[in-house]
């Protein structure tokens, strides 16, 4: 999964109106390209690029082990040894989240799918589909309000059959 998160640019005036005077709009992206992996075609990690495994582990795939990445050499899988989730903290504010998702090639729809949560509330659910012969990346976007003062939790969680596929 390749993803990018940025505050809502189309509604920047609205976002500034609701943000505290000290709050600044920030942008961050994750392309999952850090690390020089060797050996097997995947690494099981407790954390990666400011994301922490909040359930299970984060599997970073490289070397096209389960299909081509959207861009670059790496992507994340969240049905590794079990359905897993990864979380990072974000500041209070209005956001537009954009990310690319692909069902795993050759895997049943019941084993694919992902939820996006903010503070444990689902803001987007991408149902699984039958994985084709290769990865088929689709961009998804959702606007949301990270309303808590202080850290807010943004989470991606695998849904469906937990079968390590």
Image (cartoon, rainbow, N blue to C red):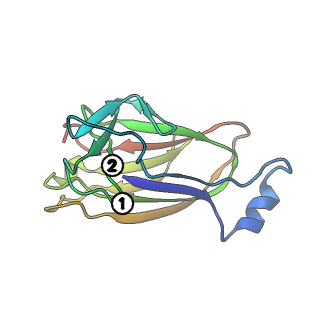
Left or right: 131 as drawn, with respect to 76:
left
x and y, in percent, of residue 121 in the image: 52, 44
Question: Where is residue 12 drawn, in percent x and y?
Answer: 72, 66
The residue nearer to you, when weighing 35 against 97, is: 35
Under tag 2, what secondary structure?
A: strand
User: Between residues 61 and 142, which one lies in front from this camera angle?
Assistant: 61
Quadrant of the snapshot with the C terminus: top left
> Could you say which disc has been placed on residue 19 in the image?
none
Residue 90, position as x, y percentages in the image: 62, 43
Q: Identify the residue under disc 1.
A: 71
Query: Residue 39: x and y, percent?
Result: 21, 34
In the image: residue 6, left or right of residue 135: right
Question: Could you tell me if the residues under marks 2 and 1 are in contact, i.e. CB atoms within 8 Å?
Answer: no
Q: Is residue 76 above or below residue 129?
A: above
Describe residue 133's horizontal placement relative to residue 5 as left or right: left
Q: Residue at x 50, y 56 (%)?
A: 4
Q: Residue at x 33, y 60 (%)?
A: 70
82 relative to 7, above or below: above
Residue that appears at 18% across and 58% down:
131
Residue at 32% across / 56% down in the picture? Answer: 127
The residue at which mark 2 appears reads as 74
Badge 2, how many Cα within 10 Å: few under 14, some, many 20+?
Answer: many
């Amino acid at each position: 999964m390749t993803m990018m998160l940025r505050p809502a640019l189309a509604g920047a005036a609205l976002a500034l109106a609701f943000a505290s005077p000290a709050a600044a709009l920030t942008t961050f992206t994750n392309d999952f390209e850090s690390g020089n992996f060797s050996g097997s075609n995947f690494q099981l990690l407790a954390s990666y690029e400011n994301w922490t495994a909040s359930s299970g582990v984060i599997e970073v795939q490289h070397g096209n082990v389960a299909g081509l990445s959207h861009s670059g050499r790496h992507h994340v899988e969240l049905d590794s040894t079990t359905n897993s989730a990864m979380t990072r903290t974000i500041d209070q504010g209005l956001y537009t989240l954009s990310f690319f998702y692909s069902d795993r090639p050759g895997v049943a729809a019941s084993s694919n799918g992902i939820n996006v949560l903010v503070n444990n509330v689902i803001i987007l659910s991408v149902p699984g589909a039958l994985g084709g012969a290769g990865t088929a990346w689709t961009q998804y976007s959702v606007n949301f309000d990270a309303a808590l003062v202080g850290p807010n939790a943004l989470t991606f969680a695998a849904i469906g059959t937990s079968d390590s596929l």
